[in-house]
Amino acid sequence: MNKSKQEEVFPRYVIINILKHFYYKKNYKGYGKFINSLSLVCKEWNEIVVPLIKTNIYTIYDHTTYTKYSLAKNDKGFRFRLILNDSSEEVYLKDINASFDSMIDTLQYSLPHPIKLRSFPSLRELQLKLDIGCNEILNQIKCTSLSTMILELTHIGKASNIELGKITNLFKFSTTVKELDIIGGITPSGMISIVDIDSLTRFTSLETLHLDGFKINVNLLNILLTRTKTLKTLSLRSLEYYGGAFSEILECIPNCESLQSLILVEFTMNLDMLVKCVNSTKSLKSLKVTTNTTVSSVSPFKWIDNLSLEHVDVNCCGDTNGFLQLWNLNESKLKSVRYDLCSHLYDNSKAYNVHELISTVNRCHSTIKKLYIQLHHPEQLIKFYENLRLPNLKTLEVKILDEPYVAIPIIPLLKSLPTIKTIKIYGMIMNFTYILDLMKSCQTIEKVHVEKVNSVDMNKLCKVLIKYPGSIRYFSISGVKSEMKSFNTYIEEISKIILNNQNIQYIRIPSPSWSKKDPIEKLSGFVLFLKALEMKSANLNGVVISGCAEISKLLEKHLLTKFWV
């Protein structure tokens, strides 16, 4: 971008906020049409801003989608994901529009045989099966921007071993690839083995490595980890190791001096070795572990003392709590913590003392901003709001695995932790009246999400959100046990909330069925909804209303089809 020209038209902060705003809307339906309409704003807007915010990637997977998108012009800023399969092969081979190739961001090669390819000069991601023809396919791709490779292992004939070093064209991208995923799996002949995993050291810019579902030599993997100094994310899932034990890998991981994220899915892990690995990997910020190994005893000198960790999700034999109790008296830097108080339902030996868990949280993890609690019954929450002290907590997620209760002690818990801005409730069917009471009582809450309620009274909800607007910006209900009857009443009350609550940005409430007996335009609720969108759409991030095509088109037009909180 010409800097002087940019600053001449828009101040720098305006450009930044424009791009930030539209980046989060790029996956919405109607995005493309909306961005195209911006070309009418002014010549400078069209030349400078529009090309930067038109980053939506469209998928081409058959004759119809190929024909539809291949006529696009590059100066419009569209990017594409091309899936070459039996449905798209013929039309691709007949096409002579070479300029279209420069708009392909992602190529997923799903054909069982090699074909003649064009160069794909702007390719950033390649998905490919490592089979007999892969070297020929790689040879035809000419680009300097490839940053992600996803390789799927397949048996070559009767061979069960793959030697990556023989796929010579794999390494011509060794200086640009930053993320490498290698995916195997169980086949009739068993697991495939990569016999020279250390050859990946030739990828000199590698930052992310995902290995999943194949045999691997421990010593060679350790060589790779030791020599890959740029590695930031390592994921080892369901691998079969030979030539050494998994504990040797845990000993080697601290040699990855830049490692920030570690994901381990392993069935023979030793907890003592994991603690030692975590303590020695000083740059580690995120740890996710799943193992079926019996939790081993930890010696007093093997307590966790890593102060760089921010996010931990460790599940040992269904036990998510034991690892979090291994912290030293020094305060951790964790930002999110997950506690499961249902372990005893499956194994009586895991019936943890709730007071002891809370004591550990207060003492060692008081800096956390997000807490996830899974409970068997709501009464367990009482011990939390009576004893929990988390001055920085912003998000509370509660999952309750029990039958519906008329009232549960979430309101006292929220009042005891006034810093909470987001509450999400999963599992049991909530009483709708209690949710209304929650919003009346806790007016510092900004986001409310409930998985399921027994019913919804739109009139009462509207009155609460207007009379007690508080700070509520996001209100979401995923499911309702008893469906509402009147679509017109539903849409009227939604409109009133949008018009009269200045804070509301997102609404998601399951809508009743629309009978379609009368044209939607004749419904009083629809007329009010049109008015609400015209006056307040700039304040909204999303409105989820299903079952009515006309309303869906309206929401698409205003980029309000966001489906999640």
Image (spheres, rainbow, N blue to C red):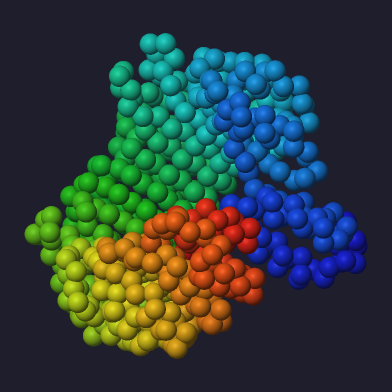
417 and 177: which one is in front? 417
18 and 215: which one is in front? 18
Residue, x 64% and y 30% (percent of image)?
Answer: 66
426 and 368: which one is in front? 426
Left or right: 412, with 350 as reference point: right
Left or right: 159, with 524 as reference point: left
Q: Position of residue 410 (x, y in %)?
A: 28, 79
Q: Position of residue 21 (x, y in %)?
A: 65, 64
Q: Split into 4 quadrants, where in the image is the N terminus?
A: bottom right
Residue, x 42% and y 84% (percent of image)?
Answer: 463
Q: Position of residue 190 (x, y in %)?
A: 30, 22
Residue 200 is at least partly visible in this image: no
Q: Quadrant of residue 351?
A: bottom left
Q: Position of residue 69 (x, y in %)?
A: 68, 35
Left or right: 100, with 183 as reference point: right
Residue 320 is at least partly visible in this image: yes
276 and 292: which one is in front? 292
Residue 281, placed above or below residue 469: above
Residue, x 77% and y 58% (percent of image)?
Answer: 38
Left or right: 394, with 44 as reference point: left
Residue, x 48% and y 59% (percent of image)?
Answer: 518
The mark total stands at 0
Residue 334, placed above or below residue 139: below
